[in-house]
Image (tube, rainbow, N blue to C red):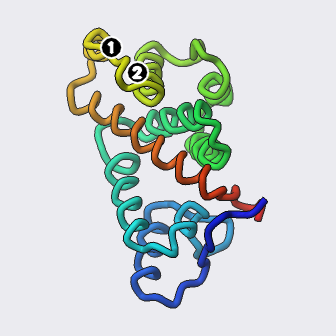
Amino acid sequence: MTSRFKQVKHPDDPELKSLYKKAIEAGLVGSEEGIPNNLVTSLSERPDFLAAILMLADKTILQGLLPPTLKQMISMTIAMQNDCRYCTRLHTNALEDMGVEQEVIQSCASDPELAAIPPTQRAILKFALKTSRDPKSVTDDDFQTLQDYGLNDGEIMEVAMMAAAENLLNTWTIVSRILVEGEE
């Protein structure tokens, strides 16, 4: 199996070089030194799309109110739900690099009840999964549950945006058949 779109690893185009530099500075590094990951290079044909994805990743994953480990847990759990092999591996690696315990990672990956996850994080993950699966099913009670755990509207908005962003990225990586780094 190969990716469906050409992936430029060493661009000549100055705009693409600049975007790759931003991606690497953001930590979106591939297996080859100085080359961004396959998600980034898969968008090399459309620098305008790449710029938009980098901005989305910056605002939803790299910045914000929620802790980075929680954001990676949201992303990995949704990627597992969507059967997105590339994103699951990407976010699992990020969680491992952040020192998250294997029991927690495995609970996010395979336990529908998320039993190994602390209650506040469990409520956040369940809200994110519900938002991702069926946004019309999200109720005022779901919002109230997160508020009862101490989340403010900005944090709840960030959880919902993380779910939406992960669905977008999962769709792209599945349709384009992006390969996991090192498997090319």
Kind of residue indicated by mark 1: Asp
Q: Which mark is residue 127?
A: 2
Evaluate if marks 2 and 1 touch, with contact meaning CB atoms under 8 Å apart. Answer: yes
Residue type marked 2: Phe
x then y, percent, for residue 46: 45, 73
- The answer to whether residue 57 is above or below residue 99 is below
Disc 2, SS: helix
> In terms of image quadrants, where is residue 30?
bottom right
Q: How many marks?
A: 2
Residue at screen point 40% across, 61% down: 54
Q: Residue at x 48, y 27 (%)?
A: 133
In front here: 122 or 179? Answer: 179
Above-or-below relation of 73 to 58: above
Provide residue 85's location: percent of width, then percent of height: 67, 44
Residue, disc 1: 142
Within-10-Å neighbours for mark 1: few <14, some 14–19, many 20+: some
Residue 150 % position (x, y)? 27, 17
- Neighbour class for label 2 at 10 Å: few (<14), some, many (≥20)? many
Distance from the alpha carbon under mark 2 to that under mark 1: 7 Å
Please name whichever residue, 131 or 68, is drawn nearer the observer in this view of the structure: 131
Q: Residue at x 70, y 56 (%)?
A: 180
